[in-house]
Image (cartoon, rainbow, N blue to C red):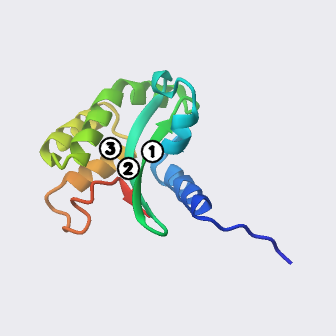
């Protein structure tokens, strides 16, 4: 006999774990955990990834942050160097200001061509994607 626990929180955690693998993230932290960490806003090597659309009983979007301090030194340096542009791009994207967001993510990719999250956002800002994906104002939808 096998024991399993199933809950929306576990599903969300599993989804975040999958995103870490796809986008080479460090550790992903959602807004509820971030609120419980004393001094979270002052911590180094944290960047806002954006909103992840997550629905179980009702639809909701959760803000997610990446803690990247444990990655290789060159990756940490590049993410810290591009953090301001990346987070500006996220804010513009969530406001529906896609041309401004696009500029921010291009600036990130000029300095860090391997930032897969910036590449994902740049694709979402493109005029060439279908309407179902554009305008969702979330980084990913699970």
Q: Residues within 10 Å of mark 3 (few under 14, many from 20)?
A: many
Proximity of marks 1 and 2: CB atoms separated by less than 8 Å: yes
Instruction: In this rendered view, identify the residue nearer to me: 1 or 45.
Output: 1
Instruction: Name which of mark 3 and mark 1 comes first in the sequence.
Output: 1
Q: Residue at x 17, y 38 (%)?
A: 103
Q: Residue at point 40% right, 37% down?
A: 48
Q: Secondary structure at mark 3?
A: helix
- Figure quadrant of residue 2: bottom right
Write down the quadrant of residue 18 in the picture: bottom right
Q: Is residue 115 left or right of residue 15?
A: left
> Against 22, is 78 above or below?
above
Separation of disc 1 and disc 2 at Cα? 6 Å
Report the mark closest to the observer, 3 or 2: 2
Looking at the image, can residue 30 be seen? no
**Any part of residue 74 in sight:** yes
Residue placed under numbered mark 2 in the picture: 51
Q: Residue 20: x percent and y percent?
A: 52, 49
Cα–Cα span, label 3 and label 1: 15 Å
Residue 118 place in picture, x, y as percent = 32, 43
| Left or right: residue 84 compared with residue 40 | left
- 2 sits to left or right of 116: right
- Residue name at image x 55 percent, y 33 percent: 71
Residue marked by disc 3: 118
Q: Earlier in the sequence, mark 3 or mark 2?
A: 2
Who is closer to the viewer here, 76 or 53? 53
Residue 102, image x, y percentages: 19, 43
Q: x and y percent of residue 61 in the render?
A: 39, 55
Question: Which one is closest to the eye, mark 3 or mark 1?
Answer: 1
Reading the image, the residue beneath label 1 is 64
């Amino acid at each position: 006999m096998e024991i399993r626990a199933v809950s929306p929180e576990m599903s969300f955690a599993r989804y975040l774990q999958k995103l870490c693998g796809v986008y080479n993230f460090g550790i992903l932290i959602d807004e509820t955990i971030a609120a419980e960490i004393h001094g979270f806003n002052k911590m180094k090597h944290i960047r806002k990834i954006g909103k992840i659309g997550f629905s179980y009983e009702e639809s909701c979007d959760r803000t997610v942050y990446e803690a990247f301090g444990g990655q290789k030194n060159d990756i940490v340096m590049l993410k810290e160097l591009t953090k301001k542009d990346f987070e500006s791009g996220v804010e513009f994207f969530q406001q529906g200001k896609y041309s401004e967001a696009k500029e921010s993510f291009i600036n990130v990719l000029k300095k860090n061509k391997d930032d897969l999250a910036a590449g994902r956002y740049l694709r979402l800002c493109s005029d060439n994607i279908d309407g179902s994906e554009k305008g969702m104002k979330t980084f990913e939808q699970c």
